[in-house]
Image (spheres, helix red, strand yellow):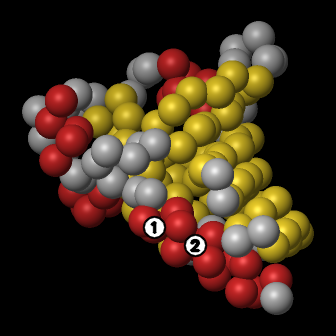
């Protein structure tokens, strides 16, 4: 049953990635307090990793430089997917092109924009409620 819940959570994350979708991201701020904001997931591999697109030198990347621990939450009336892990900042041009979606033109000139970067979240542990079934554990 746990593998079924994990698989279904991955499907929900994929469905809720890309332009017009949002999830919550929590990072530790520069004073050591947790902060939560909304962000659009770009792509994912089940619950294993999720990518996000943002700007270099902004609040998020400064927080990640200071402390790379993070939590991601996707939720709706019939699911709550909470993931805890680490975040890395990626500036590789191939990865930036691969993760690009059209909604980013509102913030950047294109995937070559020097201020654009990708955040990759790697899940360490999960707490899932999907289709009224629960699962928690470590990856």
Q: Residue at x 63, y 81 (%)?
A: 7
Element at badge 2?
helix
Element at badge 1?
helix
Residue 67 spot, x, y in % from top left:
71, 32
Left or right of 41? Residue 85 is right
Left or right of 59? Residue 131 is right
Residue 49 spot, x, y in % from top left:
57, 64
Q: Residue at x 52, y 53 (%)?
A: 120
- Disc 1 designates what residue? 14
Q: How many marks?
A: 2
Residue 63 spot, x, y in % from top left:
62, 25
Query: Few, some or many C-alpha atoms within 10 Å of disc 1 (few <14, some 14-19, many ≥20)?
Result: some
Q: Which one is nearer the viewer's eye here, 78 or 108?
A: 78
Please give the label number shown on residue 10: 2
Above or below: residue 109 compared with residue 23 = above
The reply to whether discs 2 and 1 touch (Cβ–Cβ < 8 Å) is: yes
Q: Residue at x 70, y 77 (%)?
A: 6
> Is residue 24 visible in the rendered structure shown here?
yes
* Quadrant assignment, res 137: bottom right
Q: Which one is nearer the viewer's eye here, 9 or 46?
A: 9
Quarter holding the N terminus is bottom right
Query: Going by the picture, which residue comes out furthest to the top?
Result: 31
* Quadrant assignment, res 106: top left
C-alpha gap between disc 2 and disc 1:
6 Å
Q: Which one is nearer the viewer's eye here, 104 or 61?
A: 104
Left or right of 104? Residue 133 is right
Residue 22 spot, x, y in % from top left:
46, 43
Please give the label number shown on residue 132: none
């Amino acid at each position: 049953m746990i593998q079924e819940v994990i698989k279904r959570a991955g499907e929900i994350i994929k469905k809720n990635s890309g332009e017009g979708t949002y999830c919550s991201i929590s990072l530790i701020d520069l004073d050591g307090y947790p902060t939560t904001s909304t962000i659009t997931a770009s792509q994912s591999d089940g619950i294993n990793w999720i990518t996000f697109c943002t700007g270099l030198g902004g609040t998020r990347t400064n927080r990640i430089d200071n402390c790379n621990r993070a939590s991601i939450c996707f939720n709706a009336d019939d699911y709550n997917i909470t993931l805890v892990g680490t975040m890395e900042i990626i500036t590789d041009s191939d990865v930036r092109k691969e993760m690009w979606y059209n909604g980013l033109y509102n913030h950047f000139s294109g995937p070559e924009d020097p201020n654009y970067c990708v955040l990759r979240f790697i899940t360490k542990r999960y707490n899932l409620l999907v289709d009224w079934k629960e699962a928690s554990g470590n990856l």
